[in-house]
């Protein structure tokens, strides 16, 4: 149980993990390509480098984060010294999704290990090559009674969920998040649920059209739209809609060429089941651009849709693919009625040069996190908590918050014996007035 008691041991393991990830970086990148043609650049930026940077940040700060924290004692307890101990929860289950299969498995794992827990990780069955390399790295670095990978599908996940855990960290869909929450409730196990949602992206008439289009196309079609915080649909001021549509098309062509199927920078849909689901969403919709598909390769072109109805399939659920519906608005009430039609999203984006208006939007709607004049990038700041609200999730992580997520904060009051004020002890007779005075002071 050295992993529980010794920070030095945790650091040793995290350093070994860092060396091992560096050693296998090429294999990891190849595995991600084999799973769904994730481009090397995206694999490095959003998976391996992201994890390496997280590891380095954790190693740099683990002493500070794990130290007991003194707090100012309550005068009511005088004389005492009060502090908080970060205690590992114990046995932690991490269930990961397939869309960023390396990052979303390892970032929670690093934090759980740093906080002194024993970990079982279940990676996604939909990215078997990445899962295999994850297993290999974990087996090379950790003893199985410290960190273990359990590969497999829903059946394995359900077997694991039937067991008793001290913490469950789940990243995936809202539907499975509910299953996880129910299983956790059986044992009163605390959870983090990192889920998804329909993320609006509001574009006002006073935005910088070219830059807006560039940043939206990047955030939407990164990972072929299979990103939990990708803009799900656009809400564009009708006055500039034609300009925005033209700029979006330009940016798709600049990024992926005339035929994105030939671009090495555009991934594929994860499997045939998701490909069929997405192709179904295109039926009966007006396609402004794209729309080409190829079942042999699970390919769907970056696609822009014109004004789908809120009742249509594409506007009913999180899209999670390279399809971008463009809706227009004429006034703020229309924005409000569309956004409030949905559960609280994981992200919200707004593009405008009007600072007061963007501030108002940010304060009006409830969502996990977001950006003004950009998309997705809030994810990359370790000082910003990352997580959903309401239907898009419970809890948040990144940076120190990741360490805190996997630590129980135990409050301790160390009372001194040199003084023992008699006031709190019975008999209470004649003490009420003094009590009221004291309570007024503090
Ligand atoms: P998913 O919910 O289908 O699967 C996630 C994990 O749960 C996998 O390991 C899978 O094996 C397991 N699982 C699936 N069905 C299960 C069941 N019935 N019982 C128990 N376990 C089960 O999600 P996915 O398709 O892998 O990922 C896509 C979803 O994840 C999207 O909704 C996306 O928004 C969300 N997501 C959220 C974040 C975030 O950080 N908030 C990040 C990535 C993805």
Image (cartoon, helix red, strand yellow):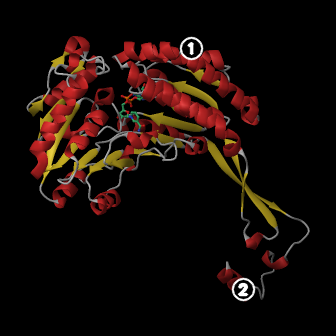
Q: Is residue 169 above or below residue 205?
A: above
The quadrant where ligand 1 appears is: top left
Q: Secondary structure at mark 2?
A: helix
Tally of marks? 2
Quarter of the view holding residue 314: top left
Where's residue 350, x and y in %? 28, 50
Quadrant location of the N terminus in the rendered image: top right
Mark 2 CB in 8 Å range of ligand 1? no
Residue at position x 62%, y 36% from top?
A: 58
Disc number at residue 267? none
Q: Secondary structure at mark 1?
A: helix
Q: Residues within 10 Å of mark 2 (few under 14, many from 20)?
A: few
Quarter of the view holding residue 29: top left
Tag in front: 2 or 1:
1
In front: 63, or 155? 63
Where's residue 180, x and y in %? 46, 36
Residue under pointer 1: 136
Between the residue at mark 2 and the residue at mark 1, the CA separation in whole angstroms equals 67 Å
In front: 398, or 190? 398
Residue 146 shows in this picture: no
Quadrant location of the C terminus in the rendered image: bottom right
Left or right: where 23 falls relative to 16: left
Quarter of the view holding residue 259: top left
Residue at position x 34%, y 16% from top?
A: 37
Q: Residues within 10 Å of mark 1 (few under 14, many from 20)?
A: some
Where's residue 346, x and y in %? 36, 44
Where's residue 216, x and y in %? 26, 39
Mark 2 vs 1, N-terminal side:
1
Residue at position x 77%, y 69% from top?
A: 77
Residue under pointer 2: 432
């Amino acid at each position: 149980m050295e992993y529980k008691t010794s920070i030095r041991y945790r650091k040793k393991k995290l350093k070994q993990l860092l060396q091992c990830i560096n050693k296998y970086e090429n294999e990891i990148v190849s595995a991600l390509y084999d799973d769904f043609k994730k481009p090397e650049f995206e694999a490095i930026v959003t998976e391996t480098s992201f994890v390496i940077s997280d590891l380095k940040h954790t190693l740099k700060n683990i002493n500070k984060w794990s130290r007991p924290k003194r707090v100012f004692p309550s005068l009511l307890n005088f004389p005492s010294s009060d502090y908080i101990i970060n205690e590992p929860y114990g046995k932690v289950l991490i269930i990961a999704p397939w869309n960023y299969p390396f990052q979303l498995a390892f970032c929670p794992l690093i934090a759980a290990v740093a906080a002194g827990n024993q970990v079982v990780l279940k990676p996604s069955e939909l990215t078997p090559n990445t899962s295999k390399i994850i297993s290999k790295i974990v087996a090379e670095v950790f003893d199985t009674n410290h960190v273990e990978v359990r590969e497999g599908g829903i059946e394995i996940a359900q077997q694991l969920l039937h067991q008793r855990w001290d913490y469950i960290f789940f990243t995936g869909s809202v539907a499975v998040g509910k299953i996880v929450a129910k299983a956790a409730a059986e044992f009163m196990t605390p959870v983090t649920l990192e889920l998804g949602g329909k993320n609006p992206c509001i574009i006002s008439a006073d935005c910088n059209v070219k830059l807006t289009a560039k940043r939206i196309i990047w955030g939407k079609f990164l990972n072929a739209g299979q990103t939990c915080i990708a803009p799900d649909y656009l809400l564009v001021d009708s006055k500039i809609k034609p300009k925005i549509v033209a700029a979006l098309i330009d940016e798709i062509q600049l990024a992926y060429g005339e035929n994105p199927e030939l671009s090495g920078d555009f991934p594929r849909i994860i499997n045939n089941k998701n490909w069929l689901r997405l192709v179904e969403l295109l039926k009966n919709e007006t396609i402004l651009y794209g729309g080409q598909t190829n079942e042999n390769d699970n390919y769907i072109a970056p696609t822009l849709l014109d004004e789908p109805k809120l009742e249509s399939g594409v506007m009913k659920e999180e899209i999670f693919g390279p399809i971008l519906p463009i809706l227009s608005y004429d006034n703020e009430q229309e924005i409000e009625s569309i956004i409030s039609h949905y559960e609280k999203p994981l992200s919200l984006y707004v593009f405008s040069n009007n600072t007061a208006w963007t501030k108002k939007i940010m304060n009006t709607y409830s969502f996990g996190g977001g950006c003004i004049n950009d998309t997705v990038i809030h994810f990359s700041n370790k000082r910003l908590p990352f997580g959903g609200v309401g239907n898009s999730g419970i809890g948040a992580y990144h940076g120190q918050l990741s360490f805190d997520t996997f630590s129980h904060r135990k409050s301790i009051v160390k009372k001194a014996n040199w003084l023992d004020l008699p006031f709190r002890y019975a008999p209470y007779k004649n003490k009420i007035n003094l009590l009221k005075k004291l309570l007024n002071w503090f």
